Image (spheres, rainbow, N blue to C red):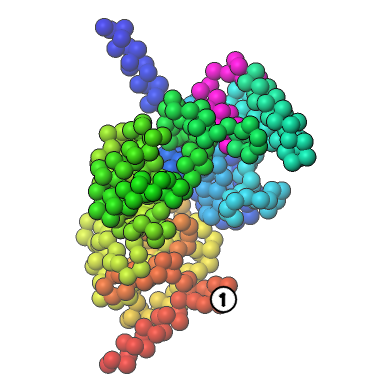
Amino acid sequence: MKKLFAIVLLVWSQNLFSQAAIAGLTYYNGPKSEMRVYKISDFLSMNEELIGSAKISESGRFNMSVPCTNIQKIVLRYDDKFAGMYIQPNAKYNIVFGDKDATVTGFKDANETEMMFFKLDTNDINYKILGFEAWMDSSVADFFYLRDVKPGDFVQKISSFKREVNEFYAAEKEPYFLKYVKYSVAGIIDNFQFVGAMSYDEKFKTYFENETIDLTHEKYMEYFDRFFEKYYFVSEKPIRDAIYDAVIRSNPQQFLQALELDPYLKNKELRNVIALKIIRDEINSKVLPRTNLVTLLKELESAFINKELGKCAHALFETFNELQIGQKVPNFQFTEKISLYNFAGKTVYLHFFDPRNQRCIAEIGALKKIQEKYKDYVTLISIYKTPLDGFNATDKRNIESLTWARIELVAEHPVWKTMKIPTFPYYILLDEQLQLKASPALSPTPNGSYDTIEKIFYEIKRKADSKQ
């Protein structure tokens, strides 16, 4: 019994203290603020959880350790830039986080930037993935042209490549990487249309029938999304009608029962994931009522026995149950005595501020002019985040230069997530009843169309003065 307890204690302590170390340098020519690290909790909701942060030095360097008990995808963000990578327990990473315009183009997102590894261990998951991706890209490029001109040779090349992959990784022991290879091949090679290609039924049996559902695996979920693409629209009419009726009634049990009509969805967990996928895919389609879908998410969150699925449902609910223009914002508690509702009665201009961000600092002068000119008509509130390493003397001077209401909040405060603050500076406009008027709102300095918030403030002042 003592030995068993010792083993359990050892495993628990290893999990508790398992970390990954990340040391990096950014060449991006911008304000040196804070590098934040998020893990992707699941690849259905794409929810990001903050797991660590570090100050970026004046020379562009940062250093941190983040919790890591298994292989997972992370996203590194600072200002409006980001890059992704994988981490594994007890690994050390040296990276350069650079300007995307320097050497690389073709990113899906305009804010995604180049990232390079140095001294990467050959046993690391990133090394393995990069090597496999380069091999597959090169191989596909070599034989893809044969698909139309020599289809027979094309089929042979596909079979040959898949055989080579199986032989090369026959001794590989890492389950995450083996799954990465399997579903990468499924997404590229097995997705080609040619005579003799795998049928829908064969693909389902190979990749889903006896496989454990894995929301946390990027390639598995990529293939899942592609395989069940537009599920609601391509399903048989009786299934589609049953789903529609369940959504109209906002009945989660009826919703899940409707999916039992699909002979491929015998697995309960698979049905549950498909249910969440339908809601995610159709939430903005206007085919199924958005309000009902959001209600279903809330119900499914508590209905799922699987905690990971419940967490995914909650993340989707948080994403889609967002404030709409015209809705009253929550009464955020800022301090023990001050909440947002204390500021009702005048238009409120929320200014989300980072005292280390050069653009934030550059706009202080314009904000002062706005404040002085319209303080009797608009309440200006600056909100800034408590950094992990505290404020230095320069930060404090920048904060003290804000001569109006200013509020310091911890990173975990709900205002950041609820109001979806993506970067700094960021502005939100609320009316006298604290209903959302604009997010983002115009800034005090001209945008690309030479518009500023002052035009709106002038109208507020003019209307107020005309009533006197």
Query: Is residue 220 placed above or below 314 in the rendered structure?
Result: above
**Magenta stretch, residue numbers:** 168-187
**Is 337 included in the stretch rendered in magenta?**
no
| Kind of element beneath mark 1 | loop
Q: Quadrant of the N terminus?
A: top left
| Closest to the observer, 452 or 194 | 194
**Is 173 included in the stretch rendered in magenta?**
yes
Q: Could you tell me which residue is drawn at 70 percent across and 31 percent down?
A: 155
Q: Which residue is mark 1?
A: 449
Residue 416 visible here? no
Q: Residue 277's spot in the image, x, y percent? A: 41, 45
| Closest to the observer, 399 or 208 | 208
Q: How many marks?
A: 1
- Give the image quarter of residue 336: bottom left
Residue furthest left in the image = 337
Q: Is residue 41 left or right of residue 333?
A: right
Q: Residue 339's spot in the image, x, y percent? A: 25, 62
| Closest to the observer, 450 or 56 | 450
Label 1 packing within 10 angstroms: few (<14), some (14-19), many (20+) = few
Q: Is residue 206 left or right of residue 458?
A: right
Q: Is residue 13 left or right of residue 366?
A: left
Q: Residue 321's spot in the image, x, y percent? A: 33, 56
Q: Residue 126's spot in the image, x, y percent? A: 59, 31
- Give the image quarter of residue 436: bottom left
Q: Could you tell me which residue is drawn at 59 percent across and 51 percent down?
A: 108
Q: Could you tell me which residue is drawn at 54 percent across and 61 percent down?
A: 358
Which residue type carries mark 1?
Ser
